[in-house]
Image (cartoon, coloured by chain):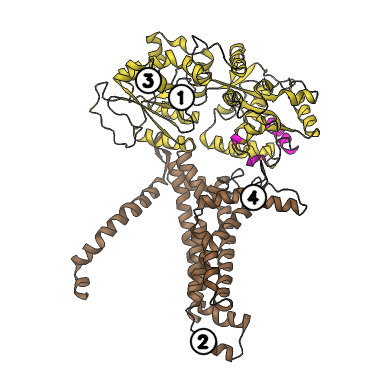
Chain colours: A brown, B yellow
Amino acid sequence: MNKVLGDRRAIFLLLGPALLVYSLVMLVPIFWSMGYTAFDGGILTGFTFVGFGNFLKFFNDPTALNATWFTLRYALILTVLQVGFGYLLALLYTFRIKHASSFIRTIIFFPVVLPTVGVGLLFQKLFEAAPTTGPVNGLLNFLGFPSVDWFGYPEQSFWVIILLDLWRSMGFYAILLYAGLVDIPEELLESARIDGASGWRLVRSIVVPLSLPVLLSSLIFSINGTLKVFDTIVALTNGGPGNSTTPLTLYMFQTSFAYGEYGYGSTIATVLTILCLLVTILIFRSTRRDLTKG
Amino acid sequence: MTGCGGSSSEGDGGGGGSTAEAGTFTYLGQNENTTIVDTLETLAGDQCSTENEAAKFTPDAIPGATWDQQLQLLAGQEGLSDFGMAAGTPSLMKQFIESGQVQDISTELEEMGIEDKILPAAASTIQALHGTDKLYALPTEFNIEGFWYNKQLLEDNGITPPETWDELVDAAAKLQAAGIQPFSASGEQGWPVTRLVGNYLMRDLGPDALQKVAEGEAKLTDPEYVKAADEVAALGQAGYFGDAPTSIDYDTSLNLFMTGKAAFLYMGSWATTAFNDEAQNKIGVDNVGFFSFPDVDGGKGSSDQVPANVGIPTMFSSKGFDDSTKAWMECIVNNYGDTVLKDSGVVSGFKVENPPADLPETTKLVQEQIANAPSSVLWFEALMTSQATTVSQSNGGGLANGSVSGEQFMKLVQDANQG
């Protein structure tokens, strides 16, 4: 094996096809798109060079800034909730319902495998206010409260989206973090218990530090996934009401493909990429110290 | 149809069924619109059978939701079909015209001596949309818009069809007090609400109100423009569009009206197909009345300027416009109007030579309105950019549920229209 991997030609032969495909379908479009950021116009009207004009436009475009704010707020809140609830569920699987947990794990994981569009339609019906009253409003009416027009107002729509994504994704993070928790050696936990640590103390001093690497991966997964949210929002609110639930990805899609402005659309995509990079670096940096300690 | 005109060597790189092929007359339409394709198929088997033998009618369809996006891509690849539905946004059509993708058919119609087959009102609507005095599309549909009302509900509440905006608002208040939802409108689509803003503007400030905005002489954020949006927002704040209008889709809005749950419906005359269908229309076709968008007191416009549109007209691509396509065009212009009226009850912008004897009342009413209207006006977003159109229509629901004020709405649309 060593002999094969020591041969440059063999390495080239093994890596070449994958590298070629990767370059063609990933790298070329990325750089192509970067190139577009310096141009204005579309395929029909032709392209004109504008330098950094598109970036200036982005920072003066209230819709783009709203979309950025929505994206950040959504990503932050959903990451805290889905990783938080995922971790709580993982703790529950590991320490409370150890052997019976596989059934509950399956139930909670189930929404992950459902198609997004289906879940979007399901939630639309659940929270429907008109022409028929959905189960949620039905419950509110039963308890004596008036129906709420969940998708008619920005704030309500935002929380329905959060709820949908939380329901859909916490099972995934629970499994991911559970895998990290079962790796903690039983002897360590046992000795901590002998030393008198239990409950919250055990979690804080033993479980959290030992599961920090997998927790960190979950955070990075989650923040990058949520910053790039697209399908759930398109299926549930399509960015509305108005553009109040439009994330950067949807705005980028509309700008490029509905308005035909490839340059500006690419600029929005580039800003989103930079945002993802910055947030990932930030998470890495803020946890580096803890990692070395743990 | 590149083969028929002797230009078969011209290769086209685009795949898919929509690109021009030798010996065929390709047509691309929207999945949702079956009227045009059905009528063309009837023509292919009947009046246009000779043309069909020379170049076989080959239809294809894609979803309307991504129509403009797909057309842009096809045009970019020189892959537009010989004939097809035009771009949904007039501003995109203008781009097609400027880049030479779409055929100017006015000269050909004149040469064939059939330019009078197209109703002047329909031709001028298309020309106004495309901002040119040439004709780049055929009016396969011609619609007027206005308020349809439930005669019974109005009569029961002692209301006569309103002639002024104030009367309309009073009627709405009266109906609401009687526990009847005054207006049915799809806030999900948005346009049935933004149409009201545009029409109010044209009644109040005159038929050129939106032309001035397009030319930069006026802004939607000017106080006299904001007033129109405020008036519509006030209807929303009063709850006249019912509970949760943003959840109401197009079909539901029609359904609410046709089941007697709402008194007024602002809609185009294409809805007569549904009104004439007894299975859908529970209130009965005789119970459906129509009045033009009312006057605004002291306004410069007038209610005989009927809001009109040509639906999505149909265009010929420059690339596929050869002799056999021209033959097809001649046949379509000569026969489409009669066939579509007879088979589908749709009023088109073509002159009807042999009107069917048993037309439904609502269709006759539409024809009368078209014949009696001295001039027509376009809709709110007709002269706006794609982005402003999207922003306007996605905020229409906000006006209807009262969550967006007139000022906010006009600012959003004005900002988007400036790009």
Residue A232 coordinates in the image, percent (x, y)? 53, 52
The residue under label 4 is A127
Residue A2 coordinates in the image, percent (x, y)? 22, 75
Look at label 3 and name its amino acid.
Ala
Mark on residue B330? none
Do circles 4 and 3 both sit on a common chain? Answer: no
Label 1 sits on a secondary structure element that is helix
Picture quarter containing residue B377?
top right
Disc 4 or disc 2, which is closer to the eye?
Answer: 4
Pointer 4 chain: A
The residue under label 1 is B36
The residue under label 2 is A188
Look at label 1 and name its amino acid.
Ile
Residue farthest to the front, as pictured:
B279
Left or right of B300 in this view: B367: left
Look at label 4 and name its amino acid.
Phe
Provide the residue span drawn in magenta. B227-251
In this orientation, does residue B220 appear? Answer: no
Left or right of B411 in this view: B54: left
Do circles 1 and 4 both sit on a common chain? Answer: no
Residue B109 coordinates in the image, percent (x, y)? 40, 13
Residue B109: in magenta span = no
Cβ atoms at labels 3 and 2 below 8 Å apart:
no
From this view, report whether residue B126 is shown above or below residue A217. Answer: above
Alpha carbon of mark 1 to alpha carbon of mark 4: how far? 38 Å
Number of marks drawn: 4
The residue under label 3 is B44
Alpha carbon of mark 4 to alpha carbon of mark 3: how far? 48 Å
Q: Residues within 10 Å of mark 4 (few under 14, many from 20)?
A: many
Q: What predominant SS class does the magenta segment belong to?
A: helix
